[in-house]
Image (spheres, grey):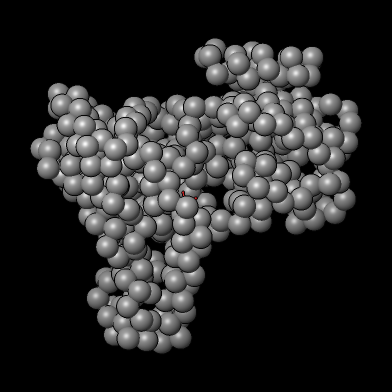
Amino acid sequence: MNAIAKKVIDIFKTDFSSIPQLYFSPGRINFIGEHIDYNDGFVMPAAINKGIYYAMALNNTDEINFNSVDFNEKLSIKISDIKKMTGWKNYVLGVVNEFQSPFYPWGEGKGLSEGFDCVFGGNIADGAGISSSAAVEGGLAFGINELLNFGLNRKELALLCQRAEHNFPGVMCGIMDQYANMFGKKDNVILLDCRSVEHEYFPLKLEGYEIVLINTKVHHSLASSEYNVRRKQCKQGLEVLKNEKGINSFRDIKTSDELMPFKEQMGNKVYDRCKYVVEEILRTQQASQLLQKNNLSEFGKLMFDTHEGLSKLYEVSCKELDFLVEKARENKDVIGSRMMGGGFGGCTINIIKKEGKEDFLTDATAAYQKKFKIEAEVIGVQIGDGTNEISI
Ligand code: GLA
């Protein structure tokens, strides 16, 4: 058992003097398909070997006791008092609130029959774009479902976590992160169709290459508000397409040229957002063929194209991310690089030839330090399984 899991369990035993169950809930990477999970697109995420450990046990009271190891903060609350708060509390309470919601089949007033004690902590940084939020939500939802026998399957849990994020923190996220958190499979990429919410797996063969994340260590505060703005802009654009052309989904557009006649009606910004979405949906379909055929160099070119679109048309990048991608572009051993996740900071994802890895990382991080006076963090990741119980 690793040091973080051990720490979480030790703290639990000290705080509550009982023996907990242990769950591991991973973060995710995404190879391609960014900001299109809420636009009926395809995405290609995978769960990683970094995430959050949850130690949990029922406590036979009407109270829930949380201890966040990473934030060094505690929260005790009666089940009947669950309400919105700020920061990490909003994420865990959002999940509990969903189990209390009349929306679910067990019906009104039949949520949690008992409280629980919970200590959690991990090794994924908040704001790094590897979805610590879905990891927080997924681990807790999985634990509650197991301990209190709600009987939800993985897809239902992913959807519950997505609703939790909409309803409490108020980020109108798509389904990608929560889905990858639940359905991750070691050494496999998930190809998720966000229209049907169905997936398939394919093994990732990286012979001679490695995936490396570089964390800019910046997280601009507009990330969640701008995220919701992007969603609205896409909706507005689709509304125009519905009214004018009877098109109900960006998926039904064959080329971004089809948008041109509506540019004036949409306005420049909305048009640019829609152009990116249509191109990214097409690009991701092409990319999935290439990755399945192991054509990494062509796949990598598409990653650069995605970055360009996210930066210029969708405008969710930032100067720090653009700088790191530019460094990658200049290096012949990096075959693909782009910003990953919601944007406005966080990580770039890079596919790098093994022999050139050290040189590139040394050069890129030194140049980044010189330019921004920030020490970028290199994060090596492996593809792992989705949220699960771990025996202790
Ligand atoms: C965040 C959201 C996801 C997805 C990505 C961008 O991670 O939670 O649903 O939209 O941004 O692809």
Picture quarter containing residue 18?
top right
Return the residue nearer the eye: 203 or 178: 178
Residue at horizontal 36%, vertical 68%? Answer: 273
For residue 275, side relative to residue 115 (left or right): left
Return the residue nearer the eye: 21 or 315: 315
On screen, residue 12 above or below 84: above
Residue at horizontal 33%, vertical 54%? Answer: 317
* Residue 196 visible in the current orientation: no
Q: Quadrant of the C terminus?
A: top right
Return the residue nearer the eye: 313 or 374: 374
Return the residue nearer the eye: 65 or 28: 65
Q: Position of residue 156 (x, y in %)?
A: 64, 47
Q: How many marks?
A: 0
Residue at horizontal 51%, vertical 60%? Answer: 225
Q: Position of residue 36 (x, y in %)?
A: 41, 58
Q: Position of residue 362 (x, y in %)?
A: 20, 27
On screen, residue 37 above or below 353: below
For residue 3, side relative to residue 257 (left or right): right
Residue at horizontal 40%, vertical 30%? Answer: 383
* Residue 275 visible in the current orientation: yes
Q: Quadrant of the N terminus?
A: top right
On screen, residue 21 above or below 309: above
Q: Position of residue 20 (x, y in %)?
A: 72, 19
For residue 32, side relative to residue 157 (left or right): left
